[in-house]
Amino acid sequence: DSGVTQTPKHLITATGQRVTLRCSPRSGDLSVYWYQQSLDQGLQFLIQYYNGEERAKGNILERFSAQQFPDLHSELNLSSLELGDSALYFCASSPDSNPWETQYFGPGTRLLVL
Amino acid sequence: AQSVTQPDIHITVSEGASLELRCNYSYGATPYLFWYVQSPGQGLQLLLKYFSGDTLVQGIKGFEAEFKRSQSSFNLRKPSVHWSDAAEYFCAVSGNTGKLIFGQGTTLQVKP
């Protein structure tokens, strides 16, 4: 158990819909990272938050947004969903935002868009 | 641009045999390198990482990796593979904010 929790575990929805994925980082960790894992794109970094502020952005679509709340949990919002958004979405956390730090991954949320 | 290449998509080894998974990276500055393992239906677990010092890094579950700057490589090794090592292995390099850039992954199958 990494100490990072993600809800829900599975999500099935229809095209055009909007969903929210939730992540609670390890106690004390200030950085939260979101990654998408799909068969065609592999594991890709989406976005990073550090202590409530956006720190880095990767290949995140404009239809996707995220935020980190004062209690440090984070939410990833996916809207106008398309079939190609079906993927496993991971959240990871680390104590700070240094490149040598270990990131601890949650179990992921599996999203299926029908 | 930073990138990671894992040349082998799929590897099969016999139980008890040695293992080497290849990883090549492209990064302008001092690289911070990681190996993660993903078992079916699970999240990613860190096996080991390199950020400075000794170029031979020891990790969990009997794994080790060697950083070779001249070859831009960070290959993962294990002297004797167990059936429970069957999983997908990811090499990653860390950007300056900590975001990870992953390779495509290598799936390890272990034959009894």
Image: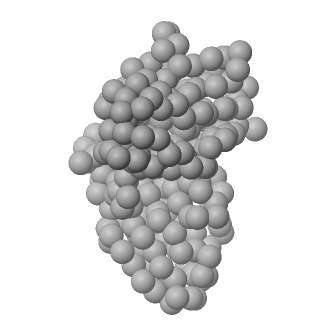
Q: Quadrant of the N terminus of chain B?
A: top right
Where residue B14 sits: x, y (%)? Answer: 42, 40
Q: Is residue A16 left or right of residue A101?
A: right
Q: Nearer the viewer, residue B99 or A97?
A: B99
Query: How many labels, in total?
Result: 0
Where residue B90 sits: x, y (%)? Answer: 51, 43
Q: Quadrant of residue A51?
A: top left
Where residue B85 sits: x, y (%)? Answer: 36, 42
Any part of residue A65 in sight: yes
Q: Is residue B64 above or below residue B84?
A: above
| Way the structure is coloured | one colour
Q: In this view, does A99 lie to the left or right of B63?
A: right
Any part of residue A72 in sight: no
Q: Nearer the viewer, residue B102 or A21?
A: B102
Residue lying at 31% horizontally and 32% vertically, measured from the top left:
B61
Residue lying at 64% horizontally and 60% vertically, measured from the top left:
A41
Residue lying at 61% horizontally and 82% vertically, measured from the top left:
A82
Residue that lies at the very extreme toward the right in this rendered image: B1
Q: In this view, does A20 lie above or below A45?
A: below
Where residue A62 sits: x, y (%)? Answer: 66, 69
Residue lying at 60% horizontally and 33% vertically, measured from the top left:
B22
Q: Nearer the viewer, residue B17 or A102?
A: B17
Q: In this view, does A9 lie to the left or right of A59?
A: left
